[in-house]
Amino acid sequence: MANSLSALRESNRRMVTEAVRNAGTLTQAQLARTTGLSPATVSTIVRELRDLGVLAITSGGGRRNAVTLAPETGLLVGIDFGHSHLRVAIGEVTRQVLAERAIPFDVDASAAEGLLAAELLVDELLEAVGAERDDILGVGLGVPGPIDPLTGILGSSTILPGWVGINPALAMEERLGLAVHVDNDANLGALAEATWGAARGRRDVAYLKVASGVGASIIIDGRVYRGASGAAGELGHITIDENGRLCRCGNRGCLETLAGGLYLTELVRATHGPGVTVSRLVELAVSGDVGCRRVIGDAGRHLGVAVASLCNILNPGLVVVGGALAEAGALLIDPILEVVRRLAIPSAAAVLAVVPGVLGERAGVLGALASVQVSNIESAL
């Protein structure tokens, strides 16, 4: 009984903190309406979190008992490793981004080279904003692979072969001398869309990242679900065709071999030239190229099979599609919905919305920035 009450109290604290973090400022009455908790419960939780240094309460100016996150001074750093890029941003705790830069980079090849490039970009941006490492409160780091929650080591040597045995957070901490929070890039994209974008205010959401590969993040009751070993959300590696082509993970017929950008661009290179990228594929499709539209439509139908399964198992109310391929908009979304309506349980399909993300290629780095704040709050709770 005591454990149940403790878990309930912790859940309510997180709910209140998340509501304030998403809104910026709420009165206690608004908090009660937003969370569904009683005014008395909200009042108690707010006082507890104020005493812990998580929330602040102000009055006057027409905003009686306005609740905000406790003020912090300092900067946040976000680092986003993609399979073919590196993006770094520096922001304030108010979520304003002060400086940001992205460079093309083969992250798969070498962890050491990737971490060094990130360190150099951090120092370059700090110099640009007139700050130093001592001004940084924390660093958020995103990588395109599953992170073992117990060891902090990447959970798949086949997805990022150059990172075998690497603990990205510790390796980056050693370089920067700062606390680093690491997470899967899809989880960070979901966090960004839930904080600023298409999933803001939603508590049961699936986020698909469809770029070079296919990844996913699952948010249940407002929190990212990671699974027993941190591999939850590896939707790109579910088997669609057990006799299909070999995937980079070592299996055959994974969803990623049918909907991932690396594979889709191969399909059009014979007719469109060797320089076709995912972004160019989308650009051509939007412009009316019949072959590129077909490739993206087929990818959407394969993704729809996976989304239908998610509906039947987890019953999310919203699926946000991010990543470079999401820029195709309805060309990708409509085929997903077509298959979901055909394959998902009708009651689950009826409540599902599938929308493109609104943060584009910046979702990963913005999520990395937001993860620092979330990590600091989690530590305080």
Image (cartoon, helix red, strand yellow):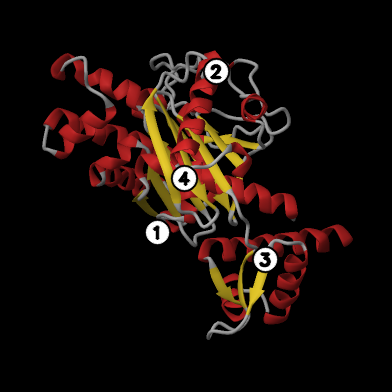
Please name the residue that numbered disc 1 is placed on: 350
| Mark 2 or 1, closer to the camera | 2
Q: Is residue 32 above or below residue 144?
A: below
What SS does tag 4 mark? helix
> Label 2 to label 3, Cα distance in Å?
38 Å
Q: Earlier in the sequence, mark 4 or mark 2?
A: 2
Residue occupying image coordinates x 25% and y 33%: 296
The residue that mark 3 highlights is: 55
For marks 1 and 4, the one nearer the N-term is 1
Whether residue 76 is visible to the viewer of this picture, yes or no, is: yes
Cβ–Cβ under 8 Å for marks 2 and 1: no
Which one is earlier in the sequence, the residue at label 3 or at label 1?
3
Label located before the other in sequence (2 or 3):
3
- Dividing the picture into quadrants, the one containing residue 254 is top left
How crowded pointer 4 is (Cα within 10 Å; few <14, some 14-19, many 20+) is rated as many
SS class, disc 3 = strand
Q: Position of residue 334 (x, y in %)?
A: 27, 46
Q: Which residue is mark 4?
A: 366
